[in-house]
Amino acid sequence: MLKMKELLYPLNALEPYYSKETLDLHYNILYKGYVDNTNNTEEKLRVAREKADFTNIKCLEKDLSFFGSGVILHELFFDNMGPAIPTEPDIELMKQIIKNFGSYEIFKQQFTEASKTVEASRLVYLSMGSQMV
Ligand SMILES: [Fe+2]
């Protein structure tokens, strides 16, 4: 059973970029909802396995993916935000952003537009892996 990760900073710690009310909404309502719904879906899957009734397996797997992604994305967000986190990329990350996106401004525009259009959580993240370098 999933449990909510503890928020490592107070709800007002991201102001003025992110209001206390907005963080409260994302942590105590939305994130909690994703955790609860992931647990509810896992329970439904347990019952389905117990009964060997997989009539709704497509829906349950889709729900598990959707709610589980919401948990992961919110935890990524909470873990990567905080009062002491720099607001601009360091030199190495900036170089990689410019290499991959053309400019920091274009990267920010793409990131912003992606966050406006992505389904549900509206969370977008940048990751670096060996294939991107
Ligand atoms: Fe959220």
Image: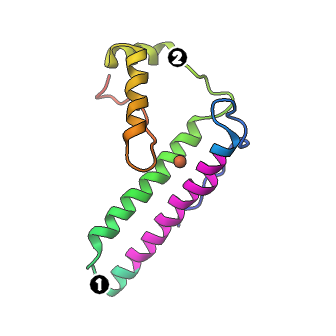
**Number of dots carrying numbers:** 2
Tell me the residue that label 1 is attached to.
52
Is tag 1's residue or tag 2's residue first in the polypeptide sequence? Answer: 1
**Mark 1: amino acid:** Ala
Characterize the local packing of mark 1: few (<14), some (14-19) or many (20 or more) Cα atoms within 10 angstroms.
Answer: few
The dominant secondary structure in magenta is helix
Question: Residue drawn 58% across and 59% down?
Answer: 32
- Judging from the image, the colouring scheme is rainbow
Q: What is the quadrant of residue 33 in the picture?
A: bottom right
Magenta stretch in the rendered image? 23-46
Q: Is residue 31 left or right of residue 92?
A: right
Instruction: Determine whether the residue tagged by mark 2 lies in a helix, strand or loop.
Output: loop
Point out residue 106 in the picture as x, y percentages from the top left corner: 38, 18
Question: Residue drawn 42% across and 50% down?
Answer: 120
Point out residue 78 in the picture as x, y percentages from the top left corner: 58, 42
Tell me the residue that label 2 is attached to.
90
Instruction: Determine whether the residue tagged by mark 1 lies in a helix, strand or loop.
Output: loop
- Whether residue 40 is in magenta: the answer is yes
Question: Residue drawn 27% across and 78% down?
Answer: 54
Which residue is at the front of the view, 128 or 10? 10
Q: What is the quadrant of residue 98 in the picture?
A: top left
Q: Is residue 130 left or right of residue 11?
A: left
Q: Is residue 27 left or right of residue 10?
A: left
State the separation of the CA atoms marked 1 and 2.
Answer: 52 Å
Q: What is the quadrant of residue 112 in the picture?
A: top left
Specify whether tag 1 is near ligand 1 (CB below 8 Å): no
Characterize the local packing of mark 2: few (<14), some (14-19) or many (20 or more) Cα atoms within 10 angstroms.
Answer: few
Which residue is at the front of the view, 56 or 45? 56
